[in-house]
Image (cartoon, helix red, strand yellow):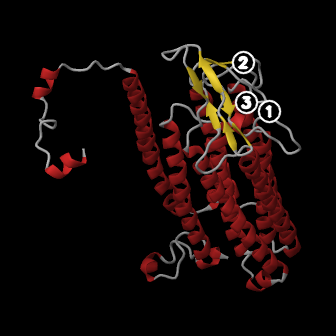
Amino acid sequence: MADTLVHSQAADSEKLWEGGKSPFKTSYGKIMMWYFLLSDAFTFAGFLIAYGTLRMSMPSWPVPDFVFSTFPGGFHHKPLFFVTLMTFVLLFSSYTMVRAVQEGQRENKNGVVIWMILTILGGIGFLSCQAWEWSTLIGKEHMTVTTNPFGTHTEHGEYLEGDGHDIKAGDIFAPGESYLIHKHDGEWHNLKYKVLEGPDAGAVKELSFGPRAFGALFFFITGFHGFHVFSGVIFLIIIAVNVATGLYVKRRNGYEMVEKIGLYWHFVDLVWVFVFLVFYLI
Amino acid sequence: MGHHSYEKSKSIVLRVIIILGLITIIEVLIALLGKGHLIEGFYLPVALTGIVMIALSLTKAYYIVDEFMHMRYEVPAFVKTVLLPTLLLVWAVIAFFYEGNDWQKRRDLIKDKDREKVEKRAKADTSDQIGLLEYNWPDAVNRKN
């Protein structure tokens, strides 16, 4: 549609400054969606850079394949399985979104509705996964915005007591290994251990909590992304209803509204690529 | 869009989603391999796996922006107005990570200093210090002590 607004270069070279043309050969709505996404990218980049800076300033950081190793159904020690599943759900919803846009461009109303419904289901699936992940971290592992029970050893040592889960008294650990401090009946059990090597060799210490900012950064950044997914689902539902009722058939603009929500939806997927990278992979 | 036939763009998108899926699987495998989950006792330095995973993630971002978001089919001038501002982030990443690294060095320094045993100075040594101890505190302060 936008193409019809654009005249050939030769014809209007003398009238370049008279307006009424689209130098970017795309609609106002799509351009503005792009600039909104650009500003949103800066917001996310600000959060992720803050995360990176704090992470770099710490001598140790919770190891992701230890923190994110539970799977629904009571499975443990399945590093990154669940979050990979989440990523694929979001990735697939991005595919169904492109398909909806393509069906819109050939004015196939039913096709748009079907692919948009699949996209909405993908978004809801992703949010459900995130809800499960959060509830496990908060409910079972007792991570909060200010308390981070996930730590990483920075010295060689020997446990002097067990935690009733994976750790037994007498177990030896090395720097870089992870631990989770358990909470029973509202009480934290910071296990005692003896330092085996290094400047503090021989000293008896208690496991200390991991870097404090981890919980706040994790919940805030994945939460902010999750909120984007949530609002995306809401807009997808509204637009899918408009498609189904035939509103965009009347407009005859190749379902441009579907393209705009598509841009937003892909952006949410794009941000997840980086959230996935810095929180789960590295 | 509109530059390809419907069938052609359908197959392009299918190819892109398969590439994205494969890259994701490769990333997860590298992350697990580097941390010793795949081969017993085999680890890779984070510096190496990190750079590879960052490169793969940027590749994924490129495919999403270029094909899914149709950037490939936009006018170059428009593409520049969106993509060039993100170059500012390159500076932000370098500056802030440099600073974060410095914080860690300071933390280490403080830790080392905490371990040092400091011998008490002889009394005469304090004479060359700013006379804080000898300062004639107002009566109100003295009474509190």
For the question of whether residue B91 can be seen, the reply is: yes
Residue labelled with disc 3: B32
Q: Tell me if mark 3 has few (under 14), some (14-19) or many (20+) residues whose alpha carbon lies within 10 angstroms of its own.
A: many
At label 3, the amino acid type is Leu
Q: Are marks 2 and 1 on the same chain?
A: yes
Residue placed under numbered mark 1 in the picture: A77
Q: Amino acid at mark 1?
A: His
CB of mark 1 within 8 Å of CB of mark 3? no
Residue at 10% x, 27% y is B127
- Distance Cα–Cα, label 1 vs label 3: 12 Å
**Residue B102: x %, y % from top left:** 40, 35
The residue depicted at 76 percent of the width and 18 percent of the height is B40
* Number of the label disc, if any, that sits on residue A171: 2
Residue furthest bottom as drawn: A250
Quadrant assignment, res B135: top left
The answer to whether A230 appears left or right of B72 in the picture is: right
Question: Which chain is disc 1 placed on?
Answer: A
Q: Nearer the viewer, mark 1 or mark 3?
A: 1
The relative height of residue A27 versus residue A186 in the rendered view (above or below) is below
Identify residue type, mark 2: Asp
> Quick one: label 2 or label 1, which is nearer the N terminus?
1
**Viewed as shown, does residue A164 lie left or right of B44?**
right
